[in-house]
Image: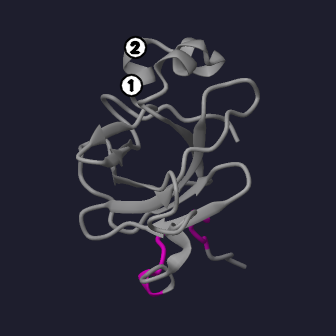
């Protein structure tokens, strides 16, 4: 008897109908004290946008979820959380995308915390280029954080 082969299970693609127009991308209300927009893109190793990824952001007590659009973009409304584990303030980020056997974990650090970022055990263990992949960039009142899944300037990911 021949047993049919099946593809391995991956974490995507995601059906956009379940991700569109959901309020889950607001960890804090727009206009709340300290609220800031966090925007970015998820791209593959060639810089091509991944249009069906899902990004989750966690601040320790709250979380949000956003799907990427046709240009691989996502956005959240967040507030800087207090430092955890003796490190710099950060958000934990889970990226789910087609072709992954399990989600990827990374972090977003805040650009206005240079002293805390310099003292952070994780950031200080990385070289300059790796470190830059984890610190958001301030652009016109928005924090920009892009996720590059592989290749040159690949975002640093952590074991889950």
Would you call the spot at circle 1 few (<14 residues within 10 Å), some (14-19), or many (20 or more)? Answer: some
Q: Indicate the position of residue 47 as horizontal and vertical percent values.
A: 24, 45
The residue sitting at 50% across, 68% down in the picture is 25
In front of the other: 31 or 112: 31
Which region of the structure is painted magenta?
A: 5-17
Q: Is 33 covered by the magenta stretch?
A: no
Q: Nearer the viewer, residue 36 or 63?
A: 36
Q: Quadrant of the C terminus?
A: top right
Residue at 27%, 56% in the rendered image = 49
State the CA–CA distance, disc 1 to disc 2. 6 Å
Up-down: is 112 above or below 103? above
Q: Determine which of the numbered discs, if any, sits on residue 128 in the image.
A: 2
Query: Taking 48 as reference, is 54 left or right?
Result: right
Q: Is residue 10 left or right of residue 86?
A: left
State yes or no: residue 7 in magenta: yes
Q: Position of residue 141 (x, y in %)?
A: 29, 48
Most common secondary structure along the magenta stretch: loop
Drawn side of residue 25 relative to residue 41, left or right: right
Above-or-below relation of 117 to 81: above
Q: Residue furthest front?
A: 33
Total numbered circles: 2
Q: How is the image coloured?
A: one colour
**Rendered location of residue 11, percent (x, y):** 57, 64
Q: Which residue is label 1 attached to?
A: 132
Outermost residue, bottom direction?
17
Instruction: Please name whichever residue, 152 or 61, is drawn nearer the observer in this view of the structure.
Output: 61
Q: Secondary structure at mark 2?
A: helix
Q: What residue do we see at 52% from left, 15% from top?
A: 115
Residue 102 visible in the shown view: yes
Q: Secondary structure at mark 1?
A: helix
How many residues crowd mark 2 within 10 Å: few (<14), some (14–19), many (20+)?
A: few
């Amino acid at each position: 008897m021949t047993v049919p082969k099946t593809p391995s299970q991956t974490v995507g693609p995601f059906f956009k109908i379940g991700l569109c127009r959901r309020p889950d991308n607001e960890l804090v209300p727009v206009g709340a004290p300290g609220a800031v927009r966090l925007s970015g893109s998820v791209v593959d190793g060639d810089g091509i946008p991944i249009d069906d990824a899902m990004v989750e952001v966690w601040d320790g007590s709250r979380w949000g979820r956003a799907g990427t659009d046709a240009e691989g973009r996502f956005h959240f409304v967040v507030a800087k959380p207090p430092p955890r584990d003796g490190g710099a303030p950060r958000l934990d980020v889970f990226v789910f995308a087609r072709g992954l056997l399990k989600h990827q974990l990374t972090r977003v650090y805040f650009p206005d915390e240079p002293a805390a970022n310099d003292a952070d055990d994780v950031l200080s263990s990385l070289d300059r280029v790796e470190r830059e992949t984890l610190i958001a960039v301030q652009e016109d009142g928005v924090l920009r954080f892009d996720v590059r899944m592989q290749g040159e300037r690949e975002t640093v990911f952590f074991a889950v």
